[in-house]
Amino acid sequence: MMVPVRCFTCGNVVGEHWEEFKTRAKEGDEDPETVLDELGVERHCCRRMLVSHKDLVDIVAPYQ
Amino acid sequence: MELRVIEKEATMVSIEIAGEDHTFMNVLKGALLETEGVTAATYDMNPEQSGGQTDPVLTIKTDEHTDALDALEAGTERVIQKSDDFEAAFEAAA
Amino acid sequence: MQDYEVEFVERGDREARFLVRDITPAFANGIRRAMIADVPTFSVDELRVVENSSVMFDEQIGLRLGLVPLTTPVDEFEVGDTVTLSLDVQGPGREESTETVTAYSGDIVTSDPMVEPADENIPIIDLKPGQRLELEADAVLDRGREHAKHQGGVAVGYRHLQRVEVVGEKGEFEDDEPHILRGVIEEQEAAHASAGSGGEPRNGELVPTEAFDHDLTNRYPGKDLEVVDVPNAFVFHVETDGSLSVDELVTRAVDSLRGRAEELRDAVQL
């Protein structure tokens, strides 16, 4: 659905970095690893929050 | 913070401190063990699920020259002193 | 009485690492626990929803808003105080070409400028044409032990400071397995250390293990090593979610310990 506001494991705020991560790594052609490093998302618990996320609002919206 | 004295002798006191948890009790216990005249200090605390006594019970034993309650007071003073010293050192480095 | 020595290894507004010497494990742990559970921060706790026609339920929106960190000024509020916030965002109109409008944490309007979202780009919910989110929210000041959303510290912890000693040369035919270490080492054997990254090695220097990729064989190639924990020296790692600065978090944690000691002393004196 929407990107989680915080990392489930450590509580770091990851939602803040989603839009930039999406434009640069998911839609753009930058390497996700370097993008995450530059965003300061260091721990692997926080990294997986962004790497494994998929926005679903567009897919769900028509069925409301 | 509500106190309930469970047992009191000249060189021994057992006291329940309502509303406190490990955060403070362990610091206090550590400070008490460094305090002069204290021969033994411990606290006992049960988890919520145990259904019984859940507030910490602090027990202090002292040598014959020291009153147990005075030792407790000295222990709290020591925690205050530690906090002040730590904060001063932290701010000096910051 | 106590001679604490504090030295910063890394220092930022939201993240820092510092070494404290001559601190007992009990006191170090007390400070750590107080940072996590006893320093209060503001967080959204209750909503009055005027209109929510988004794809998420009111409760889901409430959960997301609760997790948004809010700045918490020092000594201005008491636990239990509330500050009202509001959010009003509408999906795109007919004439607009975009398909979605996103409500961000930065769209939250506050009634008290001291309490505002610490981050502005957290997406709350995507809104499609015809959808609208309008609500009023009460942020409450409370402690981390009541709910994790009130926790100011993130990934707060400490490790022993480590001292590396060179006990000899590695045998010619010994396996060169990596020697992984995490934390901060106190450089003791600078004469044997290879600089790698991070300046000229000097005795007494604090070196984070990242400087040599956490592998001691990069720092001391070909040496037989012994690693010991330095007694009563702890390296704290403190990170905050933005509601307070690292300095505020640490000093307020210590204040809370002192406050309880004072309360107990006064109760005993009676």
Image: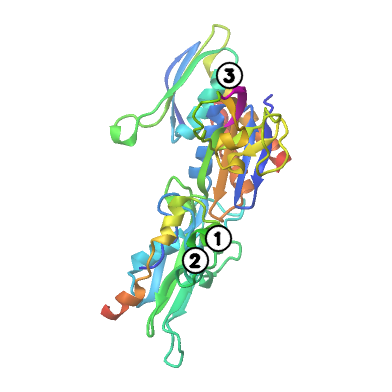
**Magenta segment:** C161-170
Both marks 3 and 2 on one chain? no
**x then y, percent, for residue C256:** 56, 40
**x then y, percent, for residue B87:** 66, 37
Residue B56, image quadrant: top left
- Residue C260 vs residue C130: left or right? right
| Image colouring | rainbow
Label annotation for residue B34: 3
Q: Label 1 to label 2, Cα distance in Å?
A: 8 Å
Q: Which residue is mark 2?
A: A21
Residue C39 shows in the view: yes
**x then y, percent, for residue C213:** 56, 43
Both marks 3 and 1 on one chain? no
Kind of residue at badge 2: Phe
Q: Which residue is mark 1?
A: A39
CB under 8 Å between discs 1 and 2:
yes
Residue C229 shows in the view: no
Task: Give the secondary structure at mark 1.
Answer: helix
Q: Label 3 to label 2, Cα distance in Å?
A: 52 Å
Is B8 drawn above or below residue C228 in the view shown?
above
Label 3, residues with CA under 10 Å away: few <14, some 14-19, many ≥20: some
